[in-house]
Amino acid sequence: MTRPLFSRRTLALLLAAGFAAGPALAQADRFPNRPIKVLIGFTAGGSTDVPFRVLAENASKILGQPVIIENKPGAGGVLPAQMMQNTPADGYTLAQIPLPVFRLPYTQKINWDPATDLQYVIGLAGYAFGLVVPADSPIKSMQDYIAYAKTHPGKLNYGTPGALTTLHLTMENIAMQAGVTLNHIPFKGNSESLQAVLGGHVMSVADTPGWAPYVEQGKLRLLSTWGDKRSAKFPNTPTLKESGINLVQTSPFGLAAPKGTDPKVVQVLHDAFKKAMEMPNYKESLAKFDMDTYYMDSATYRQYALDTMKTEKVIIDKLGLGK
């Protein structure tokens, strides 16, 4: 009778050791086997939320699991990135990373580093920006805006998605260049700020093009867009530079996972979201808000984070808004 090469007990021990040695590999091979959450830092119904829900639906079909959007508004959109610091690194919770994340170390005391304590997955798109006033406002141009601020010091107010957001810093930069004082009113997102300007509670709003439908309906007036060229959707509106203000401001965003997420899981996520963002319905949802795709692979996105942190420090120091 031939004796078995291993006893049952030895075989069990070998199998157990194998599983213990490669749990991450086994997990990556099965990924995903349950729903994935994507945390976004702005309110429902705005220019971030609407395209992200289209993207999530596309990604769900590719991954074979639901991709669920969770809104975590406030703090200028940085809460999802902060939450990644206490989230399991299993790929099942991702965070939208807007530009304000890269200035966090210079504006508040944090015990983590955006450059090294996030696993960058993919760059998705870029915000466009603009400044709007109510349609019945006497302010009809950026020149009028600056003139009003000069004759009414500290009286001209503007809403943004929050303190120390890109919108806030850019408006303060505009004010500094023009030699005027503006009154900043922070909100949790553009769904709130737009209702405030439509209701006459603030005089102007600087934001991503959640204002686009209201401009098209004639309820708001667009004074300027902030890109290096005029908006394809609003070609009659001048840029800041055309209005005599030497600024260009755009804002790419993407997705990150917690530090330490398995590279194979990151690759699965990257590939799925890349396909999802290339679908026509996602591009169409962005276009409604005058936005476009801005793809970066994982390595390029991480380098973008490193480079952007350097430039943001220069801006923060220039404006004297650091911690």
Image (spheres, rainbow, N blue to C red):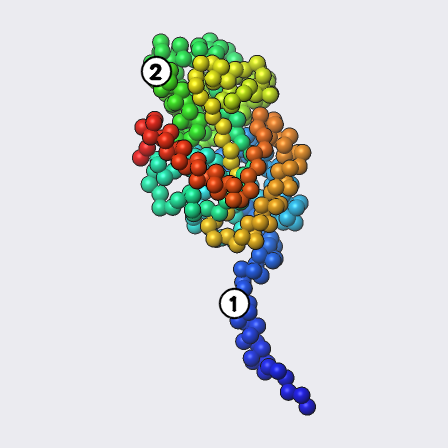
Closer to us: 87 or 7: 7
From the image, which quarter does the C terminus lie in? top left
User: In percent of the image, x 54 and y 63: which residue is there?
Assistant: 23
SS at mark 1 in the image: helix
Closer to us: 113 or 196: 113
- Residue 55, how many percent across, how many down? 61, 38
User: In percent of the image, x 35 and y 9: which residue is there?
Assistant: 151
SS at mark 2 in the image: loop
User: In percent of the image, x 61 and y 46: which residue is there?
Assistant: 271
User: In percent of the image, x 57 and y 53: which residue is there?
Assistant: 264
Question: In the displayed image of the protein, which residue is found farthest to the bottom?
Answer: 1
Locate residue 309: give its quadrant. top left
- Residue 216, how many percent across, how many down? 59, 18
Task: Indicate the amino acid at tag 2.
Answer: Gly
Residue indicated by mark 2: 179
From the image, which quarter does the N terminus lie in? bottom right
Query: How far, Cα to Cα, is label 2 from label 1?
Result: 64 Å
Residue indicated by mark 1: 20
Residue 174 left/right relative to 233: left
Does 154 sit above or below residue 52? above
Q: Is any part of residue 266 visible from this angle? A: yes
Task: Indicate the amino acid at tag 1.
Answer: Ala
Q: Is any part of residue 39 visible from this angle? A: no
- Residue 172, how many percent across, how many down? 38, 23
